[in-house]
Amino acid sequence: MFGKKKQSFEGVTVYTAFHHINGLPIAENLLCEVFSYPDRIEFKAGTTNIKLAREKITDMCLKFDTEIQNQAVSSVGGAIAGGVMFGTLGAIIGGRAKTKKVKNTTQYLIITYAGEQGELKYIGFDIKNNPPSAAKLVKEFRELNTNSGVQIEL
């Protein structure tokens, strides 16, 4: 490995990789490796390594965002069938645009943590390629979480 420092997996309880959405000082949509240890979570993207102490983490959860789009589609097959059966008028009616609903669901892992001045901050990952690993991280957080919660005065 010509001078490169190899990542040690000793002590890692969960290893996975997700696409970064926001919250870390790295580019959006960059593949980010996530290493979970009993005392911290480490994020690695390219040459950037970021550590987050577990005691700073206040919540970890999965969120789902559903987007419904209407798309106009025309049917060439309908135009041909309509033309064969009913002539020009049948082709016009058979080939007219129809509306089709397309439903896209995006899944996110959201990590909430307390910043340096105690303010709440968030890290978001798109987990569409690996939902089971995200669920493992959340389950591990729930089991290891020793925080008594966050108190916020408004």
Image (cartoon, helix red, strand yellow):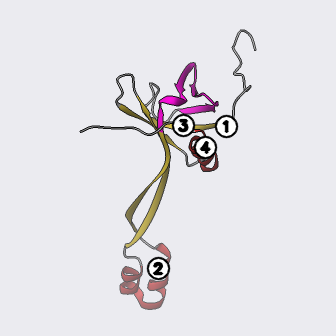
Helix, strand or loop at label 4? It is: helix
Residue at the disc numbered 4: 143
Q: CA distance from mark 1 to mark 3?
A: 18 Å
- Tell which circle, 1 or 3, labels the residue nearer the N-terminal end: 1
Dot 2, how many residues are within 10 Å of its Cα: few (below 14), some (14-19), or many (20+)? some
> What span is colored magenta in the figure?
31-58
- Tell which circle, 3 or 2, labels the residue nearer the N-terminal end: 2
Residue at the disc numbered 2: 78
Q: CA distance from mark 3 to mark 2?
A: 62 Å
Q: Is residue 32 magenta?
A: yes
In the image, residue 96 above or below residue 66: below
The amino acid type of the residue labelled 1 equals Val
Q: CA distance from mark 2 to mark 4?
A: 57 Å
Residue at the disc numbered 3: 146
Helix, strand or loop at label 1? It is: strand
Q: Is residue 100 magenta?
A: no
Q: Nearer the viewer, mark 4 or mark 1?
A: 4
Q: Nearer the viewer, mark 4 or mark 3?
A: 3
Instruction: Name the spot of residue 145 as percent of width and height, x first.
Output: 55, 39
In the image, residue 75 above or below residue 114: below
Q: Nearer the viewer, mark 2 or mark 1?
A: 1
